[in-house]
Image (tube, helix red, strand yellow):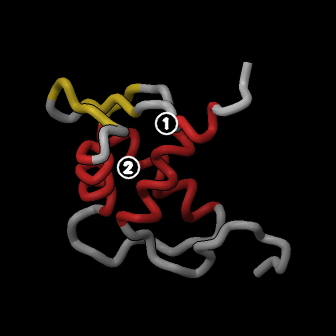
Amino acid sequence: MLMDNPYKYVGLPLTPLMAQELVIELFSGQAAGKEEIAGIVEETHLKRGGNPPRSVQHPITRALTLLKKTGLAENPIPGFWSIRSNKSEEVGKD
């Protein structure tokens, strides 16, 4: 494993909390289908040195539910999600 890998979840299985962070990072301000989001989030986690999820239910399901509760995601159509842009990252942008 590379010592300079900045990813904080190296070697860990994907969890809903990690998935939430990746959904915000990768899909902020965009809309996509749940399957696409799940695939890209898991692929990104693995490429950065993380391990596959251990749970039977994909962590993206719980992550999207939690994001919806906090107002960072909406699913106007079943299976399709709209991710709001992360307000904290927009500070200082013109």
Nearer the camera: disc 2 or disc 1:
1
Question: How many angstroms separate mark 2 from mark 1 (CA)?
Answer: 11 Å
- Compared with 37, 32 (above or below) is above
**What amino acid is at disc 1?**
Phe
Query: Within 10 Å of the Cα at label 2, are there few (<14), some (14-19), or many (20+) other Cα atoms?
Result: many
Residue 21 shown left or right of residue 7 in the figure: left
Where is residue 57 shown, x and y percent of the image?
A: 21, 65
Q: Say above or below: 24 vs 75.
A: below
The percent coordinates of residue 50 (x first, y second) are 56, 72
Indicate the position of residue 32 as horizontal and vertical percent values: 37, 30
Give the label on residue 94, or none: none
The residue positioned 30% from the left and 32% from the top of the image is 81
Q: Where does the N terminus fall, quadrant-wise?
A: bottom right
Amino acid type at circle 2 is Ala
Relative placement, left or right, of 40 versus 94 is: left
- Residue placed under numbered mark 1 in the picture: 27
**Residue that label 2 marks:** 38
* Residue drawn at the location 49% of the way across and 36% of the way down: 27
Identify the image quadrant of residue 31.
Answer: top left
Q: Up-down: is 78 above or below 10?
A: above
Q: In which quarter of the image is residue 34?
A: top left
Query: What element does badge 2 sit on?
Result: helix
Q: Which circle's residue, 2 or 1, is located before the other in the chain?
A: 1
Closer to the camera in the image, 74 or 78: 74
